[in-house]
Amino acid sequence: MTSLATIVTRWRHDVRALDPNLPLYSVQTVDEVLARARYPHRIIGTLLGLLALTALVLSAVGLYALTAHSVAERTLEIGLRVALGARTSQVAWLFIRRTLVRLAVGLTMGTAGALATGRLLQSFLVQTDARDPLTIVSVVALLAAVSLIATVLPAREAWRLDPIVALRRE
């Protein structure tokens, strides 16, 4: 297989044979031209991806902090519940239930917003429909998983709480 430099040299020779005053410069392959044309879209996609990742991390940290604060505030209540015979699943459900309600509201509003603004983003999407069900389901599943993990971690501290220590703390 011949290299691009060899081909360009042959073309220059052939072009000079036809017209010695005709210049042949800035020779590029189709792949190079397409890569240069797609570069702005790749930059925008990368920036939007970083922004989305930052938002996901911030929301997970916020949800974790909110649940951890709720666990800390309700230490006495949790201690009493455990002392009176509450199971770990019942203690965990106190916090997971709140997250599920918030998650349902947030995902409903977010999915509606994504479907509504999908047409605006159509020009940035390559070979993907703005209302691609696989993408929407994947994002909903990712957000639900991150939310539940961010809730279960501090809730785990609640169901591991020793009732005697919790009652003495207050």
Image (tube, helix red, strand yellow):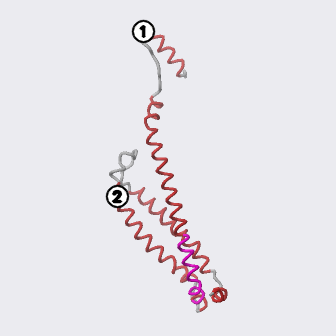
Question: In the rendering, at what x and y percent does residue 111 appear?
Answer: 38, 62
Closer to the camera, 137 or 150?
A: 150
Which corner quadrant holds the N terminus?
top right
Given residues 43 and 108, the one toward you in this image is 43
x and y percentages locating residue 136 in the rendered image: 41, 58
Location of mark 2 (residue): 115
- Which residues fall within the magenta stretch? 64-80
Mark 1: which secondary structure? Answer: loop
In what element is the residue under mark 2?
Answer: helix
Q: Is residue 118 above or below residue 28?
A: below
Is 69 included in the stretch rendered in magenta? Answer: yes
Identify whether 36 is placed above or below 16: below
At x 53%, y 83%, the residue is: 90
Q: Is residue 121 left or right of residue 151?
A: left
User: Mark 2 to mark 1: distance in Å?
Assistant: 57 Å
Q: Position of residue 46 (x, y in %)?
A: 49, 47
Q: Which residue type does callout 1 highlight?
A: Asn
Q: At which x and y percent is residue 87?
A: 57, 85
Q: Image quadrant for the C terminus?
A: bottom right
Residue located 50% across and 64% down the image: 59
Amino acid type indicated by mark 2: Leu
Q: Residue furthest bottom?
A: 84
Q: Badge 1 is on which residue?
A: 21
Report the side of 118 relative to 13 (left or right).
left
